[in-house]
């Protein structure tokens, strides 16, 4: 089984942890990254864009001038797209961009992302994320001591950690239940608490 060192918040090695090869040291299937990340981004789209068609524009439906004899192109009303203030032809309408990806594919993509970070030696395990108080400086100093330029911090429910890291643009807290491919690939280092590793292994080893 793959092994990783366990550190505390002071960057002191406190032991080693055996990782499940199925979850953390399996094959990296990069083609799944595109499929799952594309799905995540599509599901985030609001789809509230819209424009008014000629049927929605406020205005009279009266014919602007007679059909024949003026030498001008025939017109039915002033709400047609070629008139200023008229409706928009073939404009965007409200729609839902979301679609589903099989659960097995999503799980396989997360396993591949974790294996990718482990193979790059950018997967870290901490004893815990027990902070004394909510303080952004604590997270800044933590990242400096380990040399993390950008980091994804994965733990159980931890309000102190979430609030302490919320103002840092290159640091993201993520509850282990929300583990996803997009964030695993977005941040250079993945830092997981020991308790979260056990839970993640139980979910993704099946």
Image: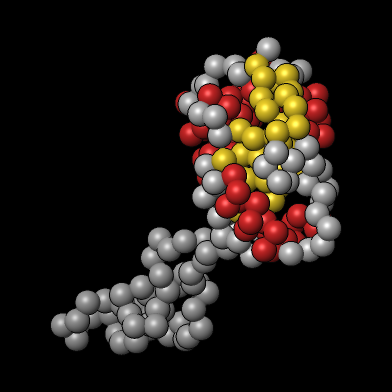
Q: Nearer the viewer, residue 147 or 120?
A: 147
- Give the image location of residue 126, x and y in percent: 73, 38
Looking at the figure, which quarter contains the C terminus?
top right
- Give the image location of residue 157, x and y in percent: 83, 48
Q: Nearer the viewer, residue 5 or 57?
A: 5
Residue drawn at point x = 67 percent, y = 56 percent: 139
- Give the image location of residue 181, x and y in percent: 59, 37
Residue drawn at point x = 82 percent, y = 49 percent: 130
| Left or right, 63 with reference to 31 | left
Which picture quadrant has residue 125?
top right
Q: Is residue 82 above or below residue 183?
A: below
Q: Is residue 202 above or below residue 89?
A: above
Q: Tell me if residue 187 can be seen.
A: no
| Left or right, 206 with reference to 181 | right
Residue drawn at point x = 31 percent, y = 87 percent: 65
Q: Tell me if residue 85 can be seen.
A: yes
């Amino acid at each position: 089984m793959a092994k990783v060192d366990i550190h505390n918040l002071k960057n002191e090695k406190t032991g080693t942890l055996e990782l499940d090869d199925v979850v953390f040291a399996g094959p990296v299937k990069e083609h799944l990254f595109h499929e799952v990340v594309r799905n995540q981004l599509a599901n985030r789209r609001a789809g509230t864009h819209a424009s008014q068609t000629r049927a929605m524009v406020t205005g009279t439906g009266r014919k602007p001038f007679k059909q024949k004899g003026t030498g001008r192109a025939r017109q039915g009303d002033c709400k047609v797209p070629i008139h200023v203030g008229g409706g928009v032809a073939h404009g965007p309408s409200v729609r839902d961009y979301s679609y589903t990806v099989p659960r097995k594919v999503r799980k396989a993509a997360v396993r591949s992302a974790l294996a990718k970070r482990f193979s790059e030696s950018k997967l870290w395990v901490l004893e815990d994320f027990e902070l004394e108080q909510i303080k952004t400086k604590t997270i800044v100093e933590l990242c400096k001591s380990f040399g993390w330029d950008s980091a994804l911090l994965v733990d159980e429910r931890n309000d102190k950690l979430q609030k302490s890291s919320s103002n840092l643009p290159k640091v993201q807290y993520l509850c282990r239940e929300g583990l996803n491919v997009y964030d695993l690939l977005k941040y250079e280092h993945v830092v997981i608490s020991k308790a979260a590793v056990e839970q993640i292994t139980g979910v993704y080893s099946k």
